[in-house]
């Protein structure tokens, strides 16, 4: 599998930046995980939007879905131009709640909604996906995703607090994409549905992941400080998210 980071910043993009979005590809399948602010502008560097096979949304917070509406418009135009068949709407896999948000994922002939939930699986091209509800705090569901293909696995942790039960889901994964919303200097005393960089690295080490990608970072964080706090992960390579970074799994 090939991973390209299209966006990773939160809660909003910095200059020339983008909030979460990740392109995962095999030789036959193109998946977009989350679709935050600025993600489409980055996606078109690598893939025409009409060549997407599916979009997966972890949850409906704005930094993860801000570009969904313009993606729907774009697909509609590509159907009008004959670049994507009108009988081939893009499937969007996302939580069923809040129901009003899920309903917005159906747009003309461009997109269709398919619900995800913990314990469910989906086969998309040559990839198998499974889902885990994370500790994200505000009542509405947020789902981590495991993507498996050709004997390799990627776990995208989405937004996840310290109460997420990772053990049976992410243990030994080839690449753990885990949020590091806070540095230790600004981590809240009371957990609020997010992890710090150090906590993410501690989880990855405990789970014996083969590699780690720290993401969901505030755009003003310095890479050196992020890397220093992630140094507790020693089981494999540790990558710090950058737009355009491409990893092979």
Image (spheres, helix red, strand yellow):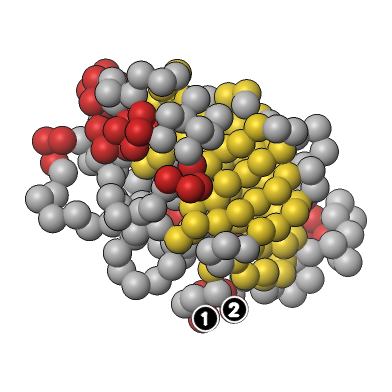
According to the image, label 2 marks what residue?
A: 103
Residue in the image at 63% along x and 44% along y: 147
Left or right: 67, with 200 as reference point: right
- The label shown at residue 125 is none
Residue drawn at x 45%, y 18% as measured from the top left? 237
* Left or right of residue 8, residue 25 in this image: right
Whole-percent x and y of residue 88?
A: 84, 62
Report, in whole angstroms, how far the alpha carbon at label 2 lies from the one at label 1.
Answer: 6 Å
* SS category of the residue bearing label 1: helix
Left or right? Give the position of 7 relative to 104: left
Residue 87 found in image quarter: bottom right
SS state under label 2? helix
Up the image or down, 142 lies above or below 157; here it is: below
Task: State left or right for residue 236 relative to residue 42.
Answer: left
Q: How many tags in the picture?
A: 2
Judging by the rendered image, the residue that carries numbered circle 1 is 99
């Amino acid at each position: 599998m090939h991973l390209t980071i299209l966006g990773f910043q939160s809660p909003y993009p910095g200059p020339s930046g983008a909030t979460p979005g990740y392109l995962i590809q095999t030789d036959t399948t193109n998946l977009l995980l989350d679709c935050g602010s600025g993600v489409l502008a980055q996606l078109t560097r690598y893939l025409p939007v009409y060549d997407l096979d599916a979009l997966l949304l972890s949850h409906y917070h704005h930094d993860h879905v801000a570009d969904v509406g313009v993606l729907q418009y774009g697909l509609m135009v590509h159907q009008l131009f004959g670049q994507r068949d009108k009988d081939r709407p893009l499937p969007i896999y996302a939580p069923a709640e809040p129901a009003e948000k899920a309903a917005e994922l159906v747009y003309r002939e461009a997109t269709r909604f398919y619900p995800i939930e913990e314990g469910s699986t989906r086969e998309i091209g040559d990839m198998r996906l499974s889902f885990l509800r994370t500790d994200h705090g505000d009542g509405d569901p947020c789902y981590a995703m495991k993507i498996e293909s050709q004997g390799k696995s990627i776990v995208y942790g989405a937004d996840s607090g310290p109460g997420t039960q990772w053990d049976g889901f992410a243990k030994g994964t080839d690449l753990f994409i885990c949020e590091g919303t806070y540095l230790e200097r600004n981590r809240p005393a009371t957990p609020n549905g997010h992890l710090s960089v150090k906590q993410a690295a501690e989880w990855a080490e405990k789970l014996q992941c083969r590699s780690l990608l720290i993401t969901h970072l505030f755009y003003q964080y310095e890479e050196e400080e992020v890397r220093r706090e992630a140094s507790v992960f020693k089981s494999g390579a540790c990558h710090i998210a950058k737009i355009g970074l491409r990893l092979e799994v």
